[in-house]
């Protein structure tokens, strides 16, 4: 299913030039900075086991998207959208050496991270008046986080998700628009593979709640400049036990800052 999502996203993106004259298309590209605050907790006591932290300049990448207009009426529209987010960079690890029994903070290191996120959404938009519009969307996605704590210890978290979105946009003036959007991602087929243990754990759950605040400046009829701030809370439920090891319960409170362009055909 992961490959199906990737291929469909790439198909939609590659079709932008071919179908630009036949369909109403919006393509987007943004630079992204990510601040991560990830924490794992003990199964028995709930004590903090380890954490990963970064600033916006430590983790970065791009957000690429394309949107095709399917149906339109004077007051509403329906679009199909494809999106991919690619991020990479370092975080500061605080924890302990696996199996040492030492407390949190006894070891501090650098983790190399790679995050990919693919999604396909069907979005419905309704114009309530000349200033206010609402939208909602439903779709499917795949997320992968490669967490390289060392050359010998690489952990890969990945899952699919059902995604629901609801939001609103308000036209402040002829040039400026501000919005608010709430997104929930329900994870399934959640796994974490650990190279040092040679095992793949089945996570008990992996869900994400996101709040986004976009500010859009209409530079021209064919291009918008978009600023976006995103807050994301990720919750992972502890895994099954394999040979005495398990993946702990964890939370991540991540923030993103984006600046980019929407190109309209």
Image: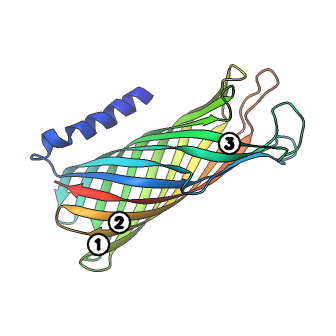
Name the residue that disc number 2 marks.
Answer: 134
Q: Which residue is mark 1?
A: 128
Closer-to-camera residue (159/256):
256
- Residue 239: image x %, image y %? 71, 33
Residue 44 numbered mark, or none: none
**Camera-side residue of 28 and 55:** 55
Vertical relation: 35 (above or below) 109: below
Q: Secondary structure at mark 1?
A: loop
Query: Do the residues under discs 1 and 2 have CB atoms within 8 angstroms?
Result: yes
Label 2 SS: strand
Q: Residues within 10 Å of mark 3 (few under 14, many from 20)?
A: some
The secondary element bearing badge 3 is classed as: strand
Mark 1 or 2 closer to N-term? 1
Q: In this view, which residue lies farthest toward the left?
A: 21
In the rendered image, which residue does mark 3 sit on? 110
Residue 21 seen anywhere in this rendered image of the structure: yes
Horizontal relation, residue 190 to residue 3: left or right? right
How packed mark 1 is, by other alpha carbons closer than 10 Å (few <14, some 14-19, many 20 or more), is few
Left or right: 187 with respect to 20?
right
Mark 2 crowd level (few <14, some 14–19, many ≥20, 10 Å Cα):
some
Which part of the image, by quadrant, shows the N terminus?
Answer: top left
Note whether 214 is above or below 6 in the view shown: below
Task: Determine whether, in the image, residue 247 is placed left or right of residue 142.
Answer: right
Q: Position of residue 181 (x, y in %)?
A: 44, 62
The image shows residue 251 at horizontal and vertical percentages of 68, 49
């Amino acid at each position: 299913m992961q490959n199906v999502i990737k291929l469909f996203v790439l198909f939609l993106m590659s079709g932008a030039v071919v179908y630009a004259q036949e369909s109403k298309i919006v393509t987007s590209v943004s630079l992204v900075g990510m601040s991560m605050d990830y924490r794992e907790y003990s199964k028995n006591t709930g004590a903090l086991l380890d954490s990963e932290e970064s600033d916006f300049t430590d983790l970065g990448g791009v957000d690429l998207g394309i949107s095709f207009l399917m149906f339109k009426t004077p007051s509403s529209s329906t679009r199909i959208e494809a999106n991919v987010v690619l991020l990479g960079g370092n975080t500061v690890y605080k924890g302990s050496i696996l199996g040492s029994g030492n407390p949190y903070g006894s070891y501090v290191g650098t983790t190399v991270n790679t995050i990919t996120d693919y999604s396909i959404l069907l979005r419905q938009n309704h114009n309530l008046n000349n200033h206010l519009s609402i939208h909602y969307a439903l779709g499917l996605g795949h997320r992968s986080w490669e967490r390289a704590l060392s050359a010998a210890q690489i952990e890969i978290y990945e899952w699919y998700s059902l995604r629901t979105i609801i939001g609103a946009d308000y036209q402040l003036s002829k040039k400026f628009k501000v919005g608010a959007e709430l997104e929930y991602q329900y994870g399934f087929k959640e796994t974490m593979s650990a190279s040092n243990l040679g095992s793949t754990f089945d996570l008990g759950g992996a869900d994400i709640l996101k709040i986004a605040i976009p500010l859009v400046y209409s530079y021209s009829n064919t291009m918008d400049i978009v600023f976006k701030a995103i807050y994301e809370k990720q919750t992972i439920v502890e895994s099954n036990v394999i040979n005495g090891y398990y993946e702990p319960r964890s939370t991540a409170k991540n923030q993103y800052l984006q600046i980019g362009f929407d190109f309209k055909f």
